[in-house]
């Protein structure tokens, strides 16, 4: 498959829907009912005041998720539910989690924080693979 055919294979509506869904998943994932309390403790154990740049955080995350989800659409659109689901799971386990692990280790972050962060992306890419496989 060449680059042009990959781009033409992208289904933009599910890409937009899953990009928006990634924010819903992130919001739910980080609530006090799931992992929010532990995540907050692990991300800032010394409770040092942090300056949050919301536009950069949300804009950068939206762009990163959009690009990743569009790439999944390019390679998975119409391949079937099981194929999409398993490919999304495999991509998260083989590329996303190891990359995050390296970053977390060099930043001296806890394995608990890595598990929370990686868990969300495993779920996101698995669900995205499922949706793209079906679409």
Image (cartoon, grey):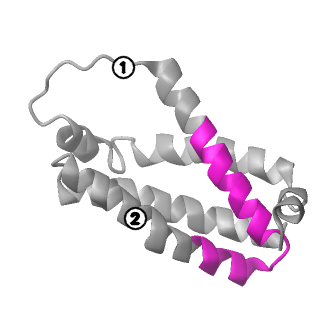
| Figure disc tally | 2
The quadrant in which residue 86 appears is bottom right
Taking 91 as reference, is 48 left or right? left
**Image quarter of the N terminus:** bottom right
Q: Disc 2 designates what residue?
A: 97
Does the magenta portion include 66? yes
Q: In this view, does 53 lie to the left or right of 67?
A: left
113 displayed left or right of 12: left
Q: Mark 1 points at which residue?
A: 52
For the point 57% across and 28% down, which residue is it? Answer: 59
Residue 40 x, y percent position in the rendering: 25, 38
Task: Name the chief secondary structure element in magenta.
Answer: helix
Judging depth in this view, the residue of 82 and 60 nearest the camera is 60
Residue at 26% over, 52% down: 104
Instruction: Identify whether 37 is placed above or below 79.
Output: above
Which residues fall within the magenta stretch? Answer: 63-88
CA gap, disc 2 to disc 1?
25 Å
Locate the C terminus and report the quarter of the image it occupies.
bottom right
Mark 1: few/some/many CA within 10 Å (<14, 14-19, 20+)? few
Q: In this view, does 127 lie to the left or right of 35?
A: right
The x, y position of residue 37, in whole percent, is 26, 41
Secondary structure under tag 1 reads loop
Disc 2, SS: helix
**Residue 57 position in % (x across, y down):** 47, 28
Image spot of residue 111 (x, y percent) = 20, 60
Q: How crowded is mark 2: few (under 14 residues within 10 Å), some or many (20 or more)?
A: some
Which callout, 2 or 1, points at the residue further toward the start of the chain? 1
Examine the rendered structure and indicate whether residue 111 appears above or below residue 16: below
Is there any visible trace of residue 121 in the rendered image? yes
Residue at x 89%, y 64% (from the top left corner): 5
Query: In front of the other: label 2 or label 1?
Result: 2
Q: In which quarter of the image is residue 47?
A: top left
């Amino acid at each position: 498959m060449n680059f042009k055919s990959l781009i033409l294979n992208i289904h933009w509506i599910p890409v937009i829907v899953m990009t928006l869904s990634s924010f819903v998943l992130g919001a739910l994932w980080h609530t006090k009912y799931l992992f929010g309390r532990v995540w907050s403790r692990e991300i800032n154990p010394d409770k040092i005041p942090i300056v949050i740049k919301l536009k950069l955080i949300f804009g950068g995350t939206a762009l990163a998720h959009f690009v990743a989800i569009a790439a999944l659409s390019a390679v998975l659109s119409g391949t079937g539910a099981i194929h999409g689901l398993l490919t999304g799971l495999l991509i998260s386990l083989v590329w996303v989690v190891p990359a995050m692990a390296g970053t977390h280790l060099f930043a001296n972050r806890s394995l608990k924080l890595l598990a929370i962060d990686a868990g969300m992306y495993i779920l996101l890419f698995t669900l995205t693979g499922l949706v793209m496989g079906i679409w």
